[in-house]
Amino acid sequence: MTMVCLLPFLDRAFQVDDSLFVWAGQQISRHPFDPYGFKLIWNTNLVRMADVTKNPPLACYYAALIGAIGGWSEVSLHLGFLLPALTLVLGTYRLAQRFTGSPFIAAAVTLLTPGVLVSASSVMCDVLMLALWVWALIFWTEGLEPVRPLHLSASVLLIAACALTKYFGVVLIPLLLAYSFTRTRKIGTWILYFLIPIIVLIAYQLWTEALYGRGLLWDAAQFATGQRATSGQPFVFANALMSVSFIGGCMLSALVLAPLVWSWRQILLVGVVAGIAGVAIALGWLRLGVSLQAEQVAKSLAQHWILISIQLTICIGAGLSVFALAATDTWNKKDADSLLLLLWVFGTFLFAGFFNWTINARSILPLIPAAAILIARRLDRLPSNPENRMPLRVAMALLISGALSLWVTQADSAWADSSRQAARIVHQKMLNDPATVWFQGHWGFQYYMQLYGAYPVDFASTRLHPGDLVVIPQNNAETYRLKKQFMASAALLEIPLHQKVTTMRWELGAGFYSATWGPLPFAVGDVPPEQYYMFRVAPIPAGVSPWEDPFAVGR
């Protein structure tokens, strides 16, 4: 099932932070002990990669291994990153065997979600981190009672690897501490094993401090705190609701299986609560932040408030279902296993909504296996007989969830491919033109523009000359307007997106990779084409900046 879902996306273009992982992997292939020792323009000017990235390098080392074996093409890297996806799904099946009599349902529910399928079609660190997370849990839960030293050793080594893939992996230490104490009712020799990942992380902090003048583990924590303080974060209640919306949208199977695990009265009650919350966000009663970008998103939501409210109601309702599953399971079971699942779900929610630098699907991703196991545990309690046709109903719900999730994944892939297509078109237009091609924007667009020989604008040092071409994407980050008096000519390149769903459009409130684009992980509606403004540069007087003020998405 995993291969069938992901093989169609092997040639998907690199997008969002894929570029950072590819570049770091290429750096590692040349300098194995200096993963971030290069410079790039990722925001507005040339800086060190060590100052840009907020992820540890293990996934980059994995990318370097793939690149060394199969090259750096999209197909090669995506094929290599199928292994973490397979490991995650099989690991969920193995872990679920401890918690439920329906491990296949838990594994299928995990796979057939937008959160997993979209993330697994990238070459970023998230799915690899979650695969290591799940297998660390497997070895720990199977090695705790009676104590099996090899299992516990394997688990803590996987915890260290998980944390060196994405810093969120550190959370496994307090999570398993709470689980182990609840299960054994005492502090045993097992607690000493946690010293291993702690020592590894301290060594990583010291190593990166020696390399780059700052320990990158602590630097990532400071960045998240500073970003939340300066970027106009939503108010607490709105932040919580957006996080719930992302949980429900990324965990779409919780929605389609809701009629099987809840009564219609319970569904109606949750629907009313979610509907009120959805309308409040769509109409701006709950402010999404104080930044200019948040204001623009809020205006767009209000213009489409009926469509946005419906989608927010669905996503928030599905997210509340996940919380209800965790709470009721703990109330009914009152054991270490139910506590582990509860802390797993709520801990991820707190991190994604209140500690990470932004709400996004990549931060929600870690709770999906836990939610899937909770659904399977709930289904275990329901009678299965020829009259209620429960297996058929579950199969149909999973089929619907899988189809919708693949639809969203295809739309995300088409959006990624549009950047590659735009870069190719610009390159073809300028083949016989001696002018220098500059561009703004980042993500996959930057990767392909640089691949074709164009130059990213460094707002601290770039000097434009008459006749140069400047390309500015509309749906991107860190872009400035070129002042009209310095435009010799202007043209618009549009790449139509034919899907009726999108993962990143502020006009529809979709912000899969960052909730600053909107309160939904994906949105259904008429998706505008991707637009790229192409300006020929007129003479610019010496010492005069050709750029307007920075503009956020939608301005």
Image: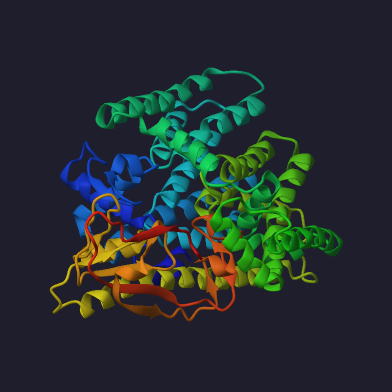
Left or right: residue 200 compared with residue 115 = left
Whole-percent x, y for residue 439 in the image: 29, 64
Q: Is residue 111 visible?
A: no
Query: Which residue extends farthest right?
Result: 265
Q: Residue at x 63, y 45 (%)?
A: 99
**Total count of labels:** 0
Whole-percent x, y for residue 360 in the image: 53, 53
Between 393 and 236, the one lying in front of the other is 236
Is residue 37 placed above or below 483 in the rendered structure? above
Is residue 478 placed above or below 51 in the rendered structure? below
Q: Residue at x 74, y 59 (%)?
A: 280
Whole-percent x, y for residue 455 in the image: 22, 61
Q: Is residue 244 visible?
A: yes
Whole-percent x, y for residue 173 in the image: 52, 30
Determine which quarter of the picture holds residue 535: bottom left
Left or right: residue 134 compared with residue 204 = right
Q: How is the image coloured?
A: rainbow
Determine which quarter of the picture holds residue 162: top left
Between 482 and 342, the one lying in front of the other is 482
Is residue 446 placed above or below 329 in the rendered structure? below
Q: Residue at x 37, y 33 (%)?
A: 216
Left or right: residue 131 compared with residue 511 = left
